[in-house]
Amino acid sequence: MKFVDEAMIEVHAGKGGDGCASFRREKFIPRGGPDGGDGGRGGSIYATADRNLNTLIDFRYARIHRARDGENGRGSDQYGKSAPDVVLRVPVGTMVLDPATGELLADLNHDGNRALLAAGGAGGLGNLHFKSSTNRAPRQFTRGVPGEHRRLKFELKLLADVGLLGMPNAGKSTLIRAVSAARPKVADYPFTTLAPSLGVVRADMNRSFVLADIPGLIEGAAEGAGLGHQFLRHLARTRLLLHLVDIAPVDPGIDPVREAQAIVRELKRYDEMLYRKPRWLVLNKIDLVPAAERERVIKSFLKGFGWKGRSFIISALAGDGCRELVFSVMDYLQHELQSSEHATKESRRRTKRRASK
């Protein structure tokens, strides 16, 4: 299935039914009084997150969504039937935005989350509501209220724990194939990956995390060059970024240090928050470097890049170093989760103490 992570739609909620002006007419009851019922409510339109979906492709071709109008009221105290609501199923991680202002209207980041996109109009009142001691034969009634009409933008941000960064052909797809059951396309030319892919990495029986692979970045990505900039948003929810670098490029004119620095610059240009996320350096394709030169090549790269953080040396194709990388990532994520839970508990305790005072 083609991956689609953006969609523009129009939603039209239903109009409320009109109230009715009617009078009771029966044999031997010449003045039965008003009996006009209310109109029914128009249908509303909701969006709900469904974990069984992973793309917005359904909304690429079905752009306009309408709910039915409520029924009009009738005589004999009959109220009009309310129209059913329309529920649009979207993948977990979908954000609903106002395309005119960019305002975030809803973030459906958990399965079952529900958001109102357009409210249906209320039904009108029948003349039954206008009777009084001084107005025994009212002929007033009200019309139904029109439903809301909005243009909206759906934007999908994948939910992943770890994201892969790197130039085209850095070995991101090979790595995700090596450590998970995901099978993205792998070939010996750049831009093999054209759409994001997710893989579940199992460190052991009860520990796992989700790894996201996006198309490779190139210099100028923040200004729209290449494909990767279209999918950088999918790394926004991750807790850790792995920066993959091809330590042994086939083309002798390619400088790994310069390419790694270009990725960092593009990341900072695109989003300062994304740039500040925890990031580890992963030097890939070490199997292509002669054993006698590996230490020198690695030291030269780290010195030229000026890297002070954590780094790993792997060969995604041969599997060397992948196990150590997976276990280190898993330990980091568990530690972060425990720290987050502890901070949440402390915050709740402080809130209770303030409330008790």
Image: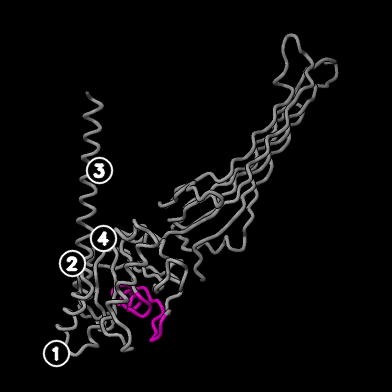
Q: Quadrant of residue 236?
A: bottom left
Residue 43 percent location from the top left of the image: 63, 42
Q: Amino acid at mark 2?
A: Lys
Q: Quadrant of residue 334?
A: bottom left
The residue beneath circle 2 is 308
User: Considering depth in this image, is 277 or 221 the residue closer to the camera?
Assistant: 221
Q: CA distance from mark 2 to mark 3?
A: 30 Å
Q: Quadrant of residue 352?
A: top left
Badge 4 crowding class, 10 Å Cα cut-off, few under 14, some 14 to 19, many 20 or more, is few
Comparing labels 3 and 4, the label whose residue is closer to the camera: 4
Q: CA distance from mark 2 to mark 4?
A: 12 Å
Q: Residue at x 22, y 88 (%)?
A: 289
Q: Secondary structure at mark 1?
A: helix
The residue beneath circle 3 is 344
Image quadrant occupied by the C terminus = top left
Numbered range of the magenta stretch = 167-190
Q: Amino acid at mark 3?
A: Thr
* Labels 1 and 4 touching (C-beta < 8 A): no
Q: CA distance from mark 1 to mark 4?
A: 32 Å
Q: Secondary structure at mark 4?
A: loop
The residue beneath circle 4 is 278
3 or 4: tag closer to the N-terminus: 4
Q: Amino acid at mark 4?
A: Pro
Residue 245 percent location from the top left of the image: 28, 76
Residue 292, numbered circle: 1
Q: Residue at x 62, y 58 (%)?
A: 63
